[in-house]
Image (spheres, rainbow, N blue to C red):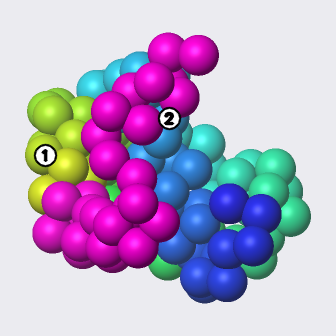
């Protein structure tokens, strides 16, 4: 999101989540170290650690002391369920209201998607 004014750790979290949801990172796969991911994104390592901590708090990654961080088993399914719920509960109402203001309906969206 080019004009995303959310905190950097949330944008990093979204990037990591996208990798998991798109299957680029699978259950059991290792995640880049905090330093490696910080260097890749030009972010502060503490910011990356905060992004990883959100996943750890949700049980989506596991830390193997001295080895690294790994995607937890079943993380993709749990993340998908959480992301769907967040979209429908928090984002969709605003999108739906905006569509109504613009006179758009689902058929307009489908037509545009198939074009």
In this rendering, the label closer to the viewer, 2 or 1: 1
Viewer can see residue 56: no
Residue drawn at x 74%, y 50% is 36
Residue 67, image x and y in percent? 46, 42
Secondary structure predominantly adopted by residues drawn in magenta:
helix
Residue 7 found in image quarter:
bottom right
Rendered view: 113 above or below 66: above
Viewer can see residue 71: yes
2 magenta-colored? no
SS class of the residue under badge 1? helix
Residue drawn at x 68%, y 60% is 1
Rendered view: 9 above or below 27: below
Question: Dot 2: within a 10 Å radius of its alpha carbon, few (fewer than 14), some, or many (20 or more) residues?
Answer: some
Residue placed most toward the observer, 105 or 28: 105
Residue drawn at x 33%, y 67% is 100
The C terminus lies in quadrant: top right
SS class of the residue under badge 2? helix
Residue placed most toward the observer, 14 or 37: 14
Residue 81 shows which numbered tag?
1
* Magenta residues (range): 86-115
Residue 28, image x and y in percent? 31, 26
Q: Please indicate whether residue 25 sits to the left or right of residue 86 in the image.
A: right
Q: Which residue is mark 2?
A: 19
93 magenta-colored? yes
Residue 51, image x and y in percent? 49, 69
């Amino acid at each position: 999101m080019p004009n995303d004014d959310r905190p950097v750790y949330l944008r990093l979290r979204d990037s990591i989540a996208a990798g998991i949801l798109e299957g680029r990172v699978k259950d059991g796969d290792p995640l880049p170290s905090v330093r490696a991911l910080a260097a890749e994104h030009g972010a502060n390592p503490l910011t990356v650690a905060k992004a990883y901590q959100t996943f750890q708090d949700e049980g989506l990654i596991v830390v193997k002391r001295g080895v690294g961080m790994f995607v937890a088993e079943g993380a993709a399914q749990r993340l998908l369920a959480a992301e769907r719920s967040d979209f429908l509960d928090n984002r969709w109402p605003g999108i739906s209201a905006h569509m109504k203001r613009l006179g758009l309906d689902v058929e307009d969206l489908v037509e545009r998607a198939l074009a």
